[in-house]
Image: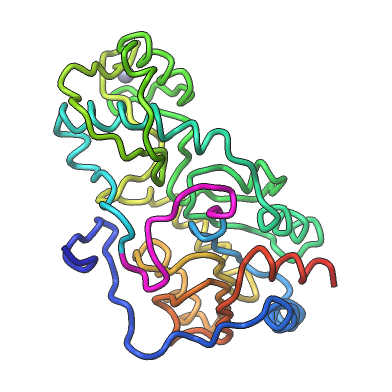
Amino acid sequence: MTAARIDPGFRTIAMPDGPAPEPLSASMAATRLAQFIEQYPRLLVLTGAGISTHSGIPDYRDGEGGWKRRPPVQHQQFMSSHAIRQRYWARSLIGWPVMRNSRPNAAHKRLAALEQQGSVPMLVTQNVDRLHQRAGSESVIDLHGRADEALCMSCGFRTSRDEVHEHCYQLNPAFRSFEATAAPDGDADLETEFDHFTPWDCPKCGGILKPDVVFFGDNVPKPRVETALNQLQNSDGLLVIGSSLMVFSGFRFCRYAQQWQKPIATLNLGRTRADSMVDLRLNADIVETLSVLLNE
Ligand SMILES: [Zn+2]
């Protein structure tokens, strides 16, 4: 299967033809980024998986924007199939602790420092790991939700992810002993029989519990998108960090920035879907570049 045919719901966008931008040293990238920030001091920053890989959280996509692994669970499948939910929660018992135990890296901390300096009035992230908040950033929009909480799809009951997992372990004690490789978004590469796995249902109404993340195939809630776009409209420009912008959910920020004549910069190892639209393309290591930037 190719990335284009899988279509993860928020719409996969084809990578434009043409060569990847030239890789830059961190010091070169930091110098150019510093100039961009000086020229456009109030930036909206959009971050993606690339910023969290240094924290040990696996990324879905390679440098060309293709899938590195089996695509993640689809919203409709999760909602309609008990078997998919069995598989999801069983695998997530192994995958989630990796995300929960991860720590913010230097890039998250640099962005929190930039916020304190007034350069990043608002941060929009496609990540669900809450590492920006844990690094000290205060104005963050979790575009795709947060993996550390779960909610009932019928009555809205909300609880922590840890609580759900504790109940799942109590219902399925055999799963305590499984080990597997962790995958993005709290998933894991566990292949076993899931037929006997009992997911924990909503304690209030018996409804389906789902992590509070926007699964592929679902839409980002409208008010959340509007808040983020308002921030973009009030900013001097857009800085994308660690995202290949392969899904429309992130790519649309570039579309709007272009429409509103806001300059766009990208800091990403590899190509992005917006390469042909941006004013400053920095193909460089994120953590090193931001570290040099702050040190200067
Ligand atoms: Zn409920």
Q: Nearer the viewer, residue 143 or 188?
A: 188
Q: Quadrant of residue 214?
A: top left
Report if residue 63 lies within the magenta region.
yes
Q: Nearer the viewer, residue 98 or 104?
A: 98
- Looking at the image, the residue that sits furthest to the bottom is 18
Which residue is depicted at the point 40% across and 20% down? 164
Is 180 placed left or right of 38 in the picture?
left
* Residue 98 coordinates in the image, percent (x, y): 50, 36
Q: Quadrant of residue 182?
A: top left
* Residue 171 coordinates in the image, percent (x, y): 31, 10
Q: Quadrant of residue 13?
A: bottom left
* Residue 256 coordinates in the image, percent (x, y): 45, 74
Total count of labels:
0
Report if residue 176 lies within the magenta region.
no
Is 75 placed left or right of 62 in the picture?
left
- Ligand 1 visible in quadrant: top left
Which residue is depicted at the point 44% across and 33% down? 96
Judged by its main secondary structure, the magenta piece is loop
Q: Is residue 276 above or below residue 34?
A: below
Is 186 placed left or right of 231 in the picture?
left
The quarter of the picture where the C terminus appears is bottom right
Which residue is depicted at the point 28% across and 32% down? 88
- Magenta segment range? 52-66
